[in-house]
């Protein structure tokens, strides 16, 4: 199986990358990034690209793929809707259209978020934008498309968020998050658990096109 990953330098993307590189069924991983991550692995092909609204220059690198794990995201804090939508909607749909042209049988797994607004009409800006993105992806002729809506994500294995405020939060809330995973196991997942669930959906499919937080931890076992 050949996998494309977008957002491998982020917290969720790092978890997905680890899972893919360690999975014997995955033969090749193509990671599209703006700057080198420093990761070296025999399966990994890292493609450097700056303009995430136009993937035409690297389209030949994005062929012979079975699935895409799209983990690229940004915090909406301090951003207006147009700027946030440019990253969440614009980048995602540009990547999706490029991948479809070269891989009509592709499965596309998109990391969204708990509370996403599928109506696109709610008051919460980030939820509207992610809802619009989900709806656009679900309307595309992929072999399958899955919208993952994790709630609280606990980074493990040395993985850190790129957002400074989040790094501080995770650094001091680690023991609390571990406790919360035991008390609320359906709503707190680790980066590894999320990566495993995304890859499981890409490999074996699931009837659920929108995977809510409560379903993520159980998904790999259901599809094994």
Image (cartoon, helix red, strand yellow):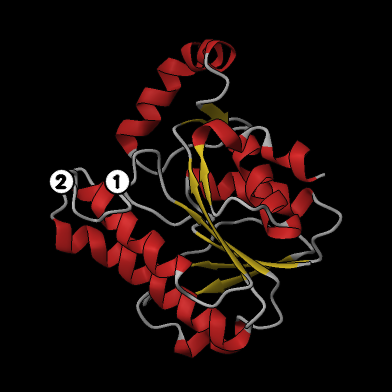
Image-based side of 74 in relation to 139, left or right: left
Q: Secondary structure at mark 1?
A: loop
Q: Give percent across and percent down for residue 79.
A: 16, 51
Q: Badge 2: how crowded within 10 Å, few (<14), some, or many (20+)? A: few
**Residue at image coords 36%, 62%:** 133
- In the rendered image, residue 107, in percent from the top left (x then y), is placed at 63, 67
Q: Position of residue 150 (x, y in %)?
A: 48, 38
> Residue at (35%, 78%) from the top-left corner?
53
| Relative to 36, residue 15 above or below | above
User: In which image quadrant can residue 161 be found?
Assistant: top left
Residue under label 2, please give it.
78
Determine whether label 1 and label 2 are within 8 Å by CB.
Answer: yes
Q: Is residue 113 in sight in this rendering?
A: yes
Q: Is residue 127 left or right of residue 180?
A: left
Q: Residue at the location (13% across, 55% down)?
A: 80
Q: Residues within 10 Å of mark 1 (few under 14, many from 20)?
A: few
Residue at 79% over, 61% down: 26
Quarter of the view holding residue 103: bottom right
Could one spot residue 34 in this view of the protein?
no
Q: Position of residue 13 (x, y in %)?
A: 54, 50
Marks 1 and 2 sit apart, C-alpha to C-alpha, by: 8 Å
Q: Which residue is mark 1?
A: 75
Question: Where, quadrant-wise, is the N terminus in this rendering?
Answer: bottom right
Which disc is residue 84 wearing?
Answer: none
């Amino acid at each position: 199986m050949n996998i494309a990953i977008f957002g491998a330098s982020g917290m969720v993307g790092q978890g997905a990358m680890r899972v893919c590189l360690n999975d014997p069924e995955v033969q090749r991983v193509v990671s599209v990034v703006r700057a080198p991550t420093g990761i070296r692995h025999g399966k990994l092909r890292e493609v450097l690209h700056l303009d995430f609204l136009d993937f035409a220059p690297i389209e030949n690198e994005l062929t012979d793929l079975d699935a895409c794990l799209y983990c690229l995201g940004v915090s909406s804090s301090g951003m207006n809707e147009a700027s946030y939508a440019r990253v969440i909607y614009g980048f995602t749909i540009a990547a999706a259209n490029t991948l479809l042209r070269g891989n009509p049988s592709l499965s596309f797994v998109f990391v969204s978020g708990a509370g996403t607004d599928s109506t696109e009409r709610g008051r919460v800006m980030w939820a509207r934008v992610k809802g619009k993105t989900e709806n656009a992806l679900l309307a595309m002729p992929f072999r399958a498309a899955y919208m993952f809506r994790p709630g609280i994500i606990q980074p493990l294995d040395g993985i850190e968020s790129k957002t400074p405020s989040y790094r501080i939060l995770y650094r001091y809330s680690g023991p609390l998050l571990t406790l919360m995973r035991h008390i609320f196991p359906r709503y707190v997942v680790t980066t590894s658990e999320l990566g495993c669930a995304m890859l499981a959906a890409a490999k074996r499919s699931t009837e659920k096109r929108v995977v809510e937080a409560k379903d993520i931890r159980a998904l790999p076992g259901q599809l094994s």
